Amino acid sequence: MDSTRWLFVFVLLALAYLVIPPLFFILYTSFVEERGAAAGTFTLAHFANIVGSLSEVRTLLWNSLIFSVGSAGCALGVGTLLAWLAERTNAPFRTMAYVSAYLSFGIPGIVKVIGWILLFGPKAGILNVAAAALTGVFPIFNLFSMPGMILIEGLLWTPVVFLLMATPFRSMDPSLEDSAAVFGGSGWQVFKRVTLPLALPSVLAVLILTFVRSLEAFEIPALIGIPAGIDVLTTQIYLQIRGGFLPKYGEASAYSILLMALVGLSLIPYYRVTRHTHKFTTVTGKGFRPRRIDLASWRWLGGFLLLLLPLVQVLPLGALMWASLLPFAKQPSAEALALLSLRNYATAFADNTIVGSILNSLMVSLAAATGTVLATFVASWFVVRTTIRSRWTLDQLAMVPLVFPGIVMGVAVLKMYLAIPLPIYGTIWIIVIAFMARYLPYGMRFSHAGLLGIHRELEESAEVCGATRVQAARNIVIPLILPALFAGWIYIFLVTIRELSVALLLYSPGSQVISVTIWELWENGHVGELAAFSLVITSGTVLLAIIFQRLAQRYSLQV
Amino acid sequence: MKKKTTKALLWAAVLVFLGVLPNAWGQGRKPTSLAELAVYSGADREQLLAAGAKAEGKVVWYTSLAGGSFKEIIKAFGAKYSGITVETYRGSSKDIMAKVLAETQAKRYLVDSIESTPPVLKAMRDSKLLTPFNAPYLGKYPEQSKEKTGKGLFFWASARESYIGLAYNKNSIPPAAVPKSYEDLLKPELKGKLGFATSDTGTRVIAALLKFKGEDFINKLKKQNISLFAISGRALLDVVISGEVGASPTIFRNHALVSIEQGAPVAWAPMEVVPTNAGGAALAAYAPHPHAAVLLTDFILGPDGQRILEEFEYGSASKDYGFKRWYPEEGLTTEQYENASTRWDKLLRELGRK
């Protein structure tokens, strides 16, 4: 067997190790007795327990679906409208909308959610209290409700939808719309018959994507859903482990399988839709600039709407800024102004655990991003460039984690390392491995796309000149694909540094990462320190997001 | 040449060993293992532990203390014994239970010293996860606050007591509506204004409601539109202070008193029974840093730690505060407590469900 084959086997085993055992342990845990004399024997009791309270399962499924459909709909509606305004109209503030959409990648979800709670808590939220003084209605918006959850989750996804939808709007050939107009179509008819069908595949793909992401969401269901009395599947899994006197891994795994099935089923239509996108290709060799519609006097309304994107990033951060300067929660007032100080910053950064969590997060994300990008680069090189018959297995293996929501990956990896004698439980490496497994599909997507863009001819010339395949890959492919890999690296770095749900069940003292530190501070009621810490962290991650945006723009990469 | 040097070194080592040995015997053997250290009663206990702990460099502490108290303990411990890092995991007793069980299963023993409620400590005792200990200062502790092993040693000693009662925001709840008993929680003025913590603090209040008022009462309480918060009782107090929740019967007296001293607009009142959390300090069976483990446990139960806990208004088993205490786990085995706890949790979740 030549070195290429050996490398192939090695990568295959590495991917299999990351993906298959967690899957196995989730299944295994859901089917065996946990404690007592019968421990380790086969049982259907965990499933029977969850099905036994049928009304409970029905409520959970119903809540999860309403939340996900609502959030996806909300994000899609707002995001698409804003993308259309930015790309196809002459509304102002386009650049601001773009910049803030990219920068939103840098702000950890948990930080935004806490900011929104400080703003719209139904009885003491800063904006609710302020609005009551103006309108006499109190609360003007109750965040602790299903609409509250949907709105905040929707807003969290709006920048992503905005960026994803801007591309088809930008690349749509206006001559198709023009032809329709020439044949007498009214504005609405052109939109309905031409624009909409052209955008439909993208719309559907984005809709399903945000739906799945909302199904997997944890921060909002935990921080807003639980106080609102609205449980969804992800919080139920967490509560099975941390909500009772003894952890119920069996039930947690049974719920996990239910959630994975739901995610898996939703991904089927996603692949159906995205597989046929080439049929709707509207970018051709023709040079054109999409026509911008003149909104005339409505232009400023469009501009105002585009300003919503930066506004929804800045508002929660503003609330945190306020909280970070106060000794305890207080409405803005002259009296509160007298209390402002930087004491929370000093307290937060004098705490070893808090400072240690920054170092841990840097290490974890650095290792996870590097590991994932390396593994997926080699894997996609095999898929794209070789003719090894079983190369598709690599692609399929790397895609399996798509059905693992973060919290489920946490349970699976935890159970795995509690059972096998590899001593990584209690260290940061258990979190690194879980992150690598979870973000394999993303790494694969970046390197796959990067490799497709490099023509085989270049390597063939090298091979003609006597280079081996590995040499050609090293000297030609790697330098050319580096920007795409680097973008993938930063993307994984950024998502892992803010990821909470995977790490929440896996951390131990000494291996806390940033997101769990924020979670712990919230749980223990240290809101001032939390706000101070979050703002400093957000500044760092936003800086990274800026670098990411520059790279993405320079190499026209899709996120 | 090289061989000669090695031989000379070996001889030198043997001679040093022979010279040192009688000297060491003369002084009496010093304890080194965790079990020995935990019961050592020599006058140099503290020095011996401090020197050993410094060499170990760190100690891992799991605690259910919330608010500023545990940070203050870490700070004071660090000031007294420099060079020892305290790695802390603060969690509810449920969190600590899950963590300890996971570590046992993975055979990765991380924790040195534990401070939590009796149900966790009992479960750990039953699974042989605690090291019995004794120390000179324990003589001053009342008998009922120590869990005896039967051989003059203890599994844990109660470091503090926390009393769960009702805290309310004086700006949100008019004086006439302030509840004086559990029954008063049904007052129509309180509808939509009550919050419960989902941590074990909330669970234990449900236990009290179930025992003293019955399940029907809990069903009636549901109509009050209760909000649940997946945060500690301490964090929920902040929510009450902010006015987001008007009143909560799941607030610890000590946390409320500290906030009242700082000028927060809240008051605390005991209900007809006060569910009590006795926080015991114990030594883990497989503490990886034995000297530091004993040193920290001594520090918490000794005068320094007790002074800090008193400053933070924690209670003591030997004092009377004028209300009736109730310990939900009293008389229950671990298994019985687990079953009861599952039921209480379920009732609590249903209480908040919309």
Image (cartoon, coloured by chain):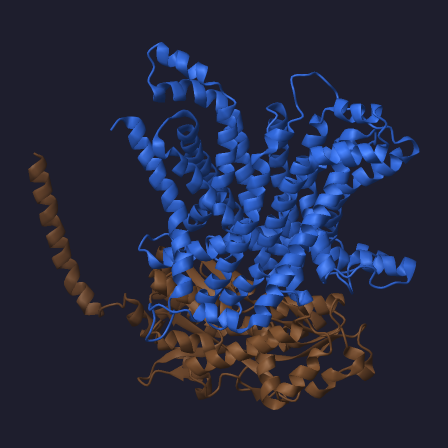
Chain colours: A blue, B brown
Residue B61: x and y in percent read 45, 64
Left or right position of B283 against A130: left
User: Residue A100's image quarter?
Assistant: top right
Q: Residue furthest front?
A: A183
Whether residue A549 is visible here, answered yes or no, is yes
Whether B73 is drawn above or below A193: the answer is below
Looking at the picture, tell me which residue is in the foreground, A275 or B312.
A275
Whether residue A547 is visible here, answered yes or no, is no
Whether A547 is drawn above or below B50: the answer is above
Left or right position of A230 against B289: right
Quadrant where the N terminus of chain A sits is: top left
Quadrant where the C terminus of chain A sits is: top right
Give the tally of numbered discs. Answer: 0
Whether A342 is drawn above or below A202: the answer is below
Left or right position of A392 against A336: left
Whether B178 is drawn above or below A469: the answer is below
User: Residue A555's image quarter?
Assistant: top right
Looking at the picture, tell me which residue is in the foreground, B299 or B327.
B327
Residue B269: x and y in percent read 70, 82
Looking at the picture, tell me which residue is in the foreground, A187 or B127.
A187
Q: Residue at x 82, y 63 (%)?
A: A139
